[in-house]
Amino acid sequence: MGDHLSASASTQSPLFRKSLRLNIAAKQALFGYAILLPTLAIIVIFRFLPMLQAFYISFHEYDLIRPPRFIGFDNFIDLLQDPLFLHSARVSVTYVVFSCVPVWVVSLALAMLFNREIRAKNFFRSAAFMPVVMPAVVNAVVWTFMYHQDGVVNTILGWFTLDPIPWLRSSRWALWAVIIIGIWRATPYYMVIFLAGLQAIPQEYYDAAQIDGADAWGQFRHITLPLLKPTTLLVMVLSVIVAMKVFAVPLIMTGGGPADSTRVLPLFIYQTAFEFFKMGRAAAMSVFLFAAVMIFTIFQIRLFSRGEE
Amino acid sequence: MRRPSHRGQTLVTYLLLTIISVIGLLPYYWMLSCSLKTNENMFLVPLQWFPNPINWSAYGDAWRAQDFTRYFLNTTFVAVAITLGNLLLASLAGYSLSKFRYFGRGALFLLILSTMMLPLEVTMVPLFLIVKKFDWPNTYEGLIVPFLVEGFGVFLMRQYLQSIPNELIEAARIDGASELRIYAQIIMPLCKPALAALGVFTFREAWDMYIWPLIIVTKDSLRTLPLGISLFMSSFGTAWDQLMAVAAIGTLPMVLLFFFLQRSFIQGIAISGLKE
C-alpha cells in the first residue's frame, strides 16, 4: 500500500514533475555559474579590485617598504600645485588633441576611398593597413632611426627644400615627432572600423539620392555622415582613450625628454611609481587619468545623443 | 562630357593610393634595407636607398649579443597562453551570460562590462601590488594570469552567441548530450569566425605588451621580445644595423599572421568597433 502510494506520487503528481523541472533548471544554472566563475575571478581580482584600490592608495603615502600612511587628499592637492604634473597633463592633452583630430578625418577619408571600386584594392588596402601590424616597440625603434638628423624623414623634407629638423633633440619638435607616429599607426586602425560602418549603409540610399540629383557632397552630408554617427562616436571615444594611454613610443624614443616635452601622463605615472616609488602619488595621478577618460566618454556620448533629437 | 573628368578622378585616386601605400610601407622598407646595410653606410649623404653591399651579418651579431632566442620564445609562450586563455574563458563566459538563466546574471555582466574601458595605465600601481602579494613578479604567472580574459572578449562572445537559436541547444539536451559536450561540440564550432577574430586580436595585443612586462620583469631569463628590443636600443644605441635586424625579426610573426589570417586580422579590428 505504502509502496504503491509513493510510486504513483513520484511519477504522476504535478508536484513531482515541477520539482524535476526545477532540478534541471537548478543544474543548468549551476553549470552557468561554473563556467562563468574563472572569468569572474580574474576580472574581479585583476581588474575590478585594482580599480577600487587605486582610489584607496591615492589617499595614502606608500613607498613599498614602510606600511601605507593615510594622508587624506594631500596627494591630490600636491599634484594640482606641482608644475611637473600640470606640464605632463598639458603634454597629454596636446598629444590627444593633435593626434586624434587628424586621425578622425583621414581615417574616414581613407575608408571612403577604399569603399569604392578600385583595381588591386586588396594590395592597396593591405599596404595602408601595415602600420597596425607593426609592434609598438618596433615602431618606436624604427621611427627613432628615421628621425635621425641625417635620416629618411629629413631627407624627404629636403626634397621639398625644407631644412632638416632636429626632431627628437629639440623640446620644440619632439612631441610632434611622437604625434606623427601616433597618427601613422592609428589611422588604418580606425579606417577599418569606419569601413565596416560604411559597408553597413545600404547602396539603395545613394541610388535614391542620385535620382533626386544630390551631388557627392550632398550624399556625404545627408546620408553618409548621419548614418555613420554611431561609428564616428565610437572611433572618437576609442581613439581618445588609446591616445591617453600612449606610453611605449615616448618612453623608448625620448624617455620623456628633452626638457620633459614628451612626458605624457602614463609615462609620468610609471616613473613616479616605479622609479621614485611614490605609489600613493602615482595612484592619485591614475585617478585623474581615470576621471579624464570617464568625463570625456560621457561628454562625447551626450554631445552625440543631443544632436539626434 | 563626363569621361575626361572621370579619367582625371581615377588618376588622382590611384596617385593617392600610391602615396598612402608608400607611407604605410616606408618604415618597413627602411627597417629591412637598413638591417642589411653596413654601419658605415647608415647615414650617407645622399641617403643610400638600397643597401650596397648587402650585409647579412647584423642578424647573427644581434642574436648573439643578447639572448634573443629566449626573449622570442618567452613572448611566443606568453602570447599563445594569453590567447588560448581568452578564447576558452571568454567563450565560456559569453555562453553562460547569453544562454543560461540564473540569479544575478545581469549584475555580473555589468561588473565585467565596467572593466572594459579601463586602461591598464589607471590600474598598474594596484595591479602590481596585487601581483606582488601573489609573489608573481618575475614569473610567467605574473605575465599571463592577469590577462587570461578581458571584458571585451566576454562582451563580444556574448553578443555573438545571442544570435544562435536556443532550439539548437534544447534539441541537443533532449538527445541527452551533457552540458560540456554541447559547449564543445555545438557551440564552439558555431563560434569559429568570432573566435578567429578574437584570437588574432588578442595575440596581437599580447605580442605588443610592453608596460606590464616592464613593471614586473627584472630577470633576463623572463624578458619578452619588446623588452629585449628596447633594452638593446638603450645599450647598443649606435648599432643601427643590428637594432633594425632585431626589430625586423620581432615584426615578422605579426606580418605572417596578417598575411595568412588577413580576414580574421581585419575582422578583429573591425569588431573592436562593437564596443558600445
Image (cartoon, rainbow, N blue to C red):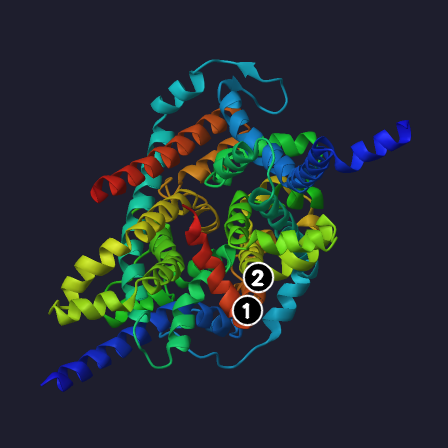
Mark 2 on the same chain as mark 1: yes
Q: Earlier in the sequence, mark 2 or mark 1?
A: 2
Residue A248 image position (x, y, % from top left): 48, 49
B175 or A290, which is in the foreground? B175
Q: Using the rendered image of the protein, determine whether residue B224 is visible from the camera's viewpoint.
A: no
Q: Is residue B122 above or below residue A235?
A: above
Q: Amino acid at mark 2?
A: Ala
Give the structural element (helix, strand or loop) at label 1: loop
- Could you say which quadrant of the image residue B218 lies in? top right
Which element carries disc 2, helix, strand or loop? helix
* Residue A162 location, quadrant: bottom left
Q: Name the residue rendered at 19%, 84% in the picture.
A: B7
Q: Which residue is mark 2?
A: B196
Look at the numbered discs 2 and 1 and tell me whether their residues touch, using CB distance below 8 Å.
yes
The foreground one among B274 and B22 is B274
Residue B259 x %, y %: 53, 72
How many badges with numbers are in the image?
2
Q: Quadrant of the N terminus of chain B?
A: bottom left
| Residue A10 % position (x, y) | 80, 34
Residue A178 showing in the rendered view:
yes
Chain hosting mark 2 = B
**Closer to the camera in the image, A11 or A46:** A11
Please give the name of the residue rendered at 31% of the width and 55% of the height, measured from the top-left corner: A103
Q: CA distance from mark 2 to mark 1?
A: 9 Å
The residue most toward the left is B1
Q: Position of residue B29 (x, y in %)?
A: 45, 72
Relative placement, left or right, of A188 versus B91 is left
Residue B37 — which label?
A: none
Which residue is label 1 attached to?
B261
Within 10 angstroms of label 2, few (less than 14), some, or many (20 or more) residues? some
The chain to which mark 1 is attached is: B
